[in-house]
Image: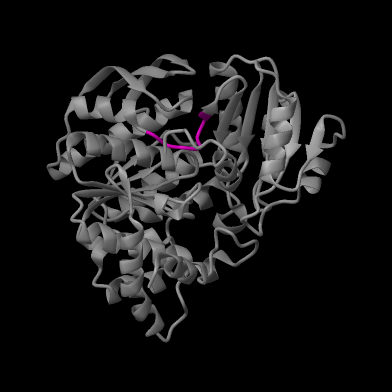
């Protein structure tokens, strides 16, 4: 099998990341993933793991935590989704993406198991998650950080038995699948909490925190809370990064520097410190130096990422109202610009109206577009109609056209903000080949 053939096989599997409508509870079967993992020898149990769920910031928390583990010298893995440009981005060992050769070898191992099973075929995400389990087992990783895909309780990553699980801030997302209330959504996220693990949670709304606390109590998991067990204060925050102080359960860390932009990344870094401190309950000690270096050097593309200057071109995958609000506040706080040119593309199943209400007030003009990669991308004309405005809003058929239009409009002192969907961000990012990957 060649690498293109492996890709073709993986692409033949149903991919819920790109589909428009489906029944979440019927389509996501944890029993199917449990059976697949068992047929492969349960490789996910060979390596110590950390499991991260939540609505906002779970990718950033995963990336920062992974960076700290690398800085300590661990053979550290990272599994995230979705990808921006190349799906090999989803599986990393230390600083390297999984190789094309390893993808081929692992697909060749998994395919006969799938083809020989009379049950329903697993999805793209389930197979690629199983591929990650095999990869990290074979590479003898010391610790792997896994980001959940959708929800948590029924997610393919939930066959893990993590030492530490973490829950980032919970807000309204995928309400047609995860639930209409914060409590219902929190129940799905808290599904990753396992007996005997330590759960570290970001600051949450009371409704969500009550659910997380209840699940921890029911399952005998120790709960650590940012805001109570771990506190922090911001010292400074600008377009170069941020400085902050943390008082943790096991120590104080003053003058920490975070290279990821925005005050929300301070909160994400604090949650990562909570995860690192929780590892001490399992005899895993990580130095203050590794924490400092890991936070300072963490890289997480497509999140308030500056890919060009004069004009600024900033990419951020804000996909719900809460994330859009955080993004708007961060842009106003850390960047200085004359006019903001918004390039926006959103999926149909997102809170389009809520995202518009947060981003339109900071925008001087708007270019609406759509990703060519997903069938659930919202129609640009429909998004424009939802704004209730006709002036200052341009619709385009694709991301390349949208970027050409934005760059032709922008002066050197302006800022082009590309957001709404990670698929749109990924397509826009391909234009900037010289950025750190």
Q: x, y percentage for residue 169?
A: 46, 38
Q: x, y percentage for residue 211?
A: 43, 47
Q: Quadrant of residue 45?
A: bottom left
In this view, the residue in front, 282 or 113, is 113
In this view, the residue in front, 186 or 437, is 437
**Figure check: 259 above or below 422:** above
Q: Is residue 250 in view?
A: no
**Looking at the image, how many numbered discs can be counted on the residues?**
0
Residue at point 48% right, 69% down?
123
Task: Give the dominant element type of the magenta stretch: helix, strand or loop.
Answer: loop
Q: Quadrant of the C terminus?
A: top left
Q: Quadrant of the N terminus?
A: bottom left
Q: Residue furthest right?
A: 390
Q: x, y percentage for residue 96?
A: 31, 46
Q: Residue furthest left?
A: 283
**Figure check: 146 above or below 271:** below
Q: Is residue 339 in view?
A: yes
Residue 16 is left or right of residue 265, and the answer is right
Residue 42 is left or right of residue 261, and the answer is left
Q: Is residue 140 magenta?
A: no
Q: Is residue 302 magenta?
A: yes
Q: Which residues are magenta?
A: 299-306
The colour scheme used here is one colour
**Figure check: 109 above or below 392:** below
Q: x, y percentage for residue 305?
A: 50, 31
Residue at point 55% right, 23% down?
330
């Amino acid at each position: 099998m060649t690498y293109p053939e492996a890709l073709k096989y993986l692409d033949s599997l149903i991919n819920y990341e790109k589909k428009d409508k489906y029944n979440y509870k019927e389509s996501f079967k944890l029993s199917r993933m449990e059976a697949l993992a068992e047929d492969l020898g349960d490789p996910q149990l060979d390596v110590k793991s950390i499991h991260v769920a939540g609505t906002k910031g779970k990718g950033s928390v995963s990336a920062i935590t992974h960076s700290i583990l690398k800085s300590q010298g661990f053979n550290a893995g990272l599994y995230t989704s979705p990808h921006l440009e190349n799906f090999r981005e989803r599986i990393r060992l230390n600083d390297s993406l999984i190789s094309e050769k390893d993808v081929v070898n692992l697909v060749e191992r998994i395919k006969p198991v799938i083809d020989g099973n009379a049950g329903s075929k697993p999805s793209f995400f389930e197979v690629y998650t199983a591929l990650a389990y095999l990869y990290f087992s074979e590479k003898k990783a010391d610790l792997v950080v896994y980001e959940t895909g959708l929800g948590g309780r029924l997610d393919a990553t939930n066959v893990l038995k993590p030492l530490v699980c973490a829950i980032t801030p919970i807000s309204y997302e995928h309400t047609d699948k995860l639930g209409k209330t914060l409590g219902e959504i929190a129940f799905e996220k808290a599904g990753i909490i396992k007996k005997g693990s330590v759960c570290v949670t970001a600051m949450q709304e009371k409704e969500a925190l009550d659910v997380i606390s209840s699940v921890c109590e029911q399952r005998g998991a120790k709960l650590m809370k940012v805001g109570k067990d771990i506190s922090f204060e911001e010292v400074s925050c600008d377009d170069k990064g941020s400085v902050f102080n943390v008082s943790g359960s096991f120590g104080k860390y003053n003058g920490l520097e975070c290279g990821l932009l925005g005050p929300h990344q301070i909160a994400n870094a604090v949650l990562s410190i909570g995860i690192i401190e929780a590892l001490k309950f399992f005899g895993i000690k990580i130095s203050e130096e590794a924490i400092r270096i890991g936070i300072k050097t963490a890289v997480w593309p497509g999140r308030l990422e500056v890919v060009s200057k004069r004009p600024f071109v900033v990419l951020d995958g804000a996909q719900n109202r809460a994330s859009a609000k955080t993004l708007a506040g961060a842009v106003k706080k850390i960047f200085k610009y004359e006019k903001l040119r918004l390039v926006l593309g959103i999926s149909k199943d997102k809170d389009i109206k809520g995202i518009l209400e947060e981003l339109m007030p900071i925008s001087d003009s708007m270019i609406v577009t759509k990703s060519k990669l997903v069938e659930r991308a919202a129609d640009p004309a429909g998004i424009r109609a939802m704004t209730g405005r006709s002036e200052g809003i341009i619709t385009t058929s694709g991301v390349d056209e949208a970027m050409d239009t934005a760059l032709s409009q922008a002066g050197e002192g302006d800022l082009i903000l590309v957001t709404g969907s990670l698929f749109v961000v990924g397509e826009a990012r391909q234009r900037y080949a010289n950025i750190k990957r």
